[in-house]
Image (cartoon, rainbow, N blue to C red):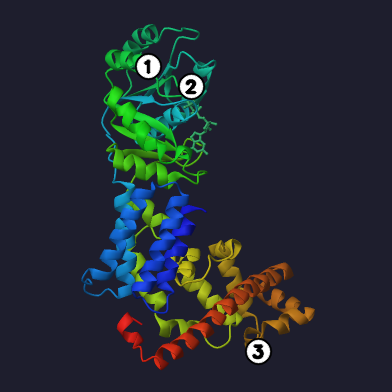
Amino acid sequence: MDLGRGLRQALAKITGAMVVDEKAVKELCTQLQRVLISNDVNVKLVFELTKRIEKRALDEKLLAGLSVREHVVKVVYDELVALMGEKYEPKMSPHKVLLLGLYGSGKTTSAGKLAAFYKQRGLSVGLVAADVDRPAAYEQLEQVAKKAGAKFYGINGEKDVGKVLKHCLPLCKEDIVIVDSSGRSAFEGELVEQLKLINSVFAPDEKYLVINADIGQVAGRQAQEFHDAVGLSGVIITKMDGSGKGGGALSAVAVSGAKVAFIGVGEKQGDLEIFDAKKFVGRLLGFPDFGALLEKIKSVADEKQLQEDMGDKFTIKVFYEQLKAAKKMGPLGSVFSMMGMADMPADVVKQSEGKLKKYECIIASMTPKEREDALLVKKEKGRMERIAKGAGVKVEDVRELLVQFEKMSSMINQFKKNRGFRKKMEKMMKGANVDMTKFGM
Ligand SMILES: Nc1nc2c(ncn2[C@@H]2O[C@H](COP(=O)(O)OP(=O)(O)OP(=O)(O)O)[C@@H](O)[C@H]2O)c(=O)[nH]1
Ligand SMILES: [Mg+2]
């Protein structure tokens, strides 16, 4: 399962739970374990993490202004951030970079990404082709350099890496000089020898090991081996976009003592991010800004507001209000999943601002009766045409609004069914003389 989605669903257990008690926290921890282990996070790390979460969630004093629910979410967030590492601060002054790593890990691609990264920040960049083993490595880097607007250095066909460097390095006058080195299928002596040679001739300021996220927790051991052999200043984890093991790779590198410096999130040169655990976890949970997250939980999980928002009947009018409010809240899908609902249908979430405007016009040309009863519009084609004309849009636009409305409507109904279940449970709890307010309800 996708890590973000899995974590959001686990947290929804708490934000949507009837009572936030020991049982709910334990259930949350069990689900977190499942999600993290399936993302290849080391089992021991996962158990330590959930033990801490359980203890802190249940024993720690509540911070002023936080409900039990928010407290638990905050603890999970804090602990996930600690698990994934810290924030990297790349040098922004002129310096020399060596990229190293196994075959296909993404060294050459990352060289281009780094070149683009520094170019964008106003520094000139030179790329040096020091992969003397892989056929066509020279041409590949040459193209990458051209795309990034970087200078390119190399000797085509030269197999002696020492010669390449001795020839090229004196020519490099750029602020940032990046050397792309050869890969191997595994960590081994010959590669280490070559890296040591590059190390002594080039004397890089930064040595980044490039690792493919797909290797998951093995990344920790690999970072350790390379660090012991040649010393590392950081790790670049690539293919975070397509891997189900990114969490495993990140956490393993974090415990190995090496720092994750950048992450690759796609094949394009712009797909590189400076690693920042807080930002990363915030985004996984659907909220780049954690303060904002707490605010949202507060407003969204507020029972009364939920009642008001949803009303007894889900009408087009309510739909539009919700869509507008949710747009303001940011990543809509996650808000709903925080409330204990599944992630929203993706195409409902992706309504653009322009669409919203269009919807506004359509809804404005509906009669109050139509706004209360969408079926009326659906049943009578004449109404649809009238509305479209009044709003200055196409009939298809009206139809599309209705489709989106129906999608939401059926989701809300599902949720309401759960709420019926909730009410029943509340009654049962009352019968058993359990005071739910004690649990933060
Ligand atoms: N989706 C995705 N693909 C990536 C990323 N980084 C690299 N790739 C792809 O991974 C493949 C290998 O990348 P390279 O940069 O050639 O890897 P390398 O480490 O230089 O490989 P060798 O020179 O053979 O050792 C290419 O197809 C890249 O497009 C990433 O962050 N996301
Ligand atoms: Mg390469």
- Say whether residue 52 is left or right of residue 163: left
- Residue ID at (37%, 43%): 250
Measured in 3D between alpha carbons, the distance from the residue under mark 3 to the one under mark 1, in whole angstroms, is: 78 Å
Q: Which residue is mark 3?
A: 369
Which residue ends up furthest to the right in the rendered image? 381
Q: What numbered label is drawn on residue 180? A: none
- Say whether residue 87 is left or right of residue 12: left
Instruction: Kindly indicate whether the residue at mark 1 contacts the one at mark 3 (C-beta within 8 angstroms).
Output: no
- Say whether residue 147 is left or right of residue 400: left
* Quarter occupied by residue 220: top left
- Residue at disc 3, secondary structure: helix
Mark 1 belongs to which amino acid?
Gly
The image shows residue 114, relative to residue 159, as above or below, that is: below
In the rendered view of the protein, which quadrant contains the C terminus?
bottom left
Between circles 1 and 2, the one closer to the viewer is: 1
- Say whether residue 413 is left or right of residue 162: right
- Residue at disc 2, secondary structure: helix
Measured in 3D between alpha carbons, the distance from the residue under mark 1 to the one under mark 2, in whole angstroms, is: 25 Å
Q: Which residue is mark 1?
A: 189
- Residue ID at (63%, 70%): 404
Q: Which residue is mark 2?
A: 141
* Label 1, residues with CA under 10 Å away: few <14, some 14-19, many ≥20: few
Mark 2 belongs to which amino acid?
Leu
Between circles 3 and 2, the one closer to the viewer is: 2
* Label 3, residues with CA under 10 Å away: few <14, some 14-19, many ≥20: few
Count the numbered circles shown.
3
Does any atom of ligand 2 lie closer than 8 Å to the CB of label 2? yes
- First reached walking from the N terminus: tag 1 or tag 2: 2
- First reached walking from the N terminus: tag 3 or tag 2: 2
Residue 49 is at least partly visible in this image: yes
- Residue at disc 1, secondary structure: helix
Does any atom of ligand 1 lie closer than 8 Å to the CB of label 1? no
